Amino acid sequence: MSGDDAQLDNHHHAPIVGYHRAPLSQKFGAPRQPNLVALTSVIEMLAPYDTPAAFVGLEAFSHIWISWQFHHNYIKKDNSANKNADTTKTTGFRPQVRPPRLGGNQKIGVFASRSMYRPSALGLSVVKLERVEVIQGRAFLIISGADMIDGTPIIDIKPYVAYSDALVEAESGFAPTAPTLLAVTMTEPAYEQFVALANTGQLINNEKAINIEQDTVTTLMHQMQSQLLPSDIDIIKALIAQDPRPAYRRTQINMPFTMRYKSVDVSFQLIAGDELQITAVVEVI
């Protein structure tokens, strides 16, 4: 068997069936696990997988499994011919990782973690299926609780079956319970910035609805990815309460961080041992 044949035997090629459309376009701020934040998003199916016939019966299930790809991973590969080179450099394989849950310092095996740096670069999440929406003959899945960002390639979708998938006696290793949430407050200037931008977004959207015939697909994507709504303030606070900061910076008082949400950059910082404060909400130009 040639080297090329062996390489083909060691790989499986799966089609991309759709893309995730969401308010979060960057990894920073995204929930580290599914169902920690009730963030609404959309799976836009691609042809031919977007036919409504493929989803008949799915709405009888409250939750679904999603296989997806970590598309923001950029592992530099060293093409050196040195056979003794570090396998991390030559293959991109990292045998050990530092989970944030363990403080970002302790190493464990990659297969004992849910790290994004996996040999397959594949993720697996259970999310709530809000509804299947058919627009212009195409199927869209409205979901909530995803830990994926905007543009994430979707590999497969399957129904979640409680009697076999929910194992109440399962042990969860170093993550036996959900992470502790931090308190999140907001300065008055930041709140005023948010309200002004949310109201502006509402006015622009209303003008479009009056003056032009809107493409319903475009409207759906705009609502999920760009249009800032008054209700988004609760989602923003819930995302920040998860504390997306790197583990080694979690004790640094007044160190600013910025999370991009839809069309705004939200700046926040630690002002006390367990309180994060939003200090600015600025429109992305």
Image (spheres, rainbow, N blue to C red):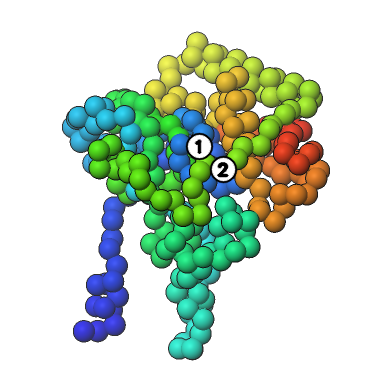
Label 1: which secondary element: loop
Amino acid type, callout 2? Pro
Residue under the image location 21 percent in, 84 percent down? 1
Q: Viewed as shown, does residue 124 lie left or right of 196?
A: left
Query: Which residue is identified by label 1?
Result: 36
Label 2: which secondary element: loop
Residue under the image location 49 percent in, 47 percent down? 176
Residue under the image location 42 percent in, 59 percent down? 121
Q: Distance between the residues labelled 2 and 1?
A: 9 Å
Q: In this view, does 248 lie above or below 82?
A: above
Q: Position of residue 275 (x, y in %)?
A: 73, 36
Q: Position of residue 51 (x, y in %)?
A: 22, 34
Q: Where is residue 130 in the image (x, y as percent from the top left)?
A: 36, 26
Query: Which residue is identified by label 2?
Result: 179
Q: Which mark is residue 197?
A: none
Please say whether residue 66 is visible from this viewpoint.
no
Instruction: Give the mark nearest the N terminus, 2 or 1.
Output: 1
Please say whether residue 101 is visible from this viewpoint.
yes
Instruction: Look at the numbered discs 2 and 1 and tell me whether their residues touch, using CB distance below 8 Å.
Output: yes
Residue under the image location 19 percent in, 30 percent down? 56
- Give the position of the C terminus as an image quadrant: top right
Q: Which of 176 and 146 is in front in this view?
A: 176
Mark 2 vs mark 1: give the one in front.
2
Report the residue that reaches farthest toward the top. Answer: 210
Neighbour tally class for label 2: few under 14, some 14-19, many 20 plus, Cα within 10 Å = some
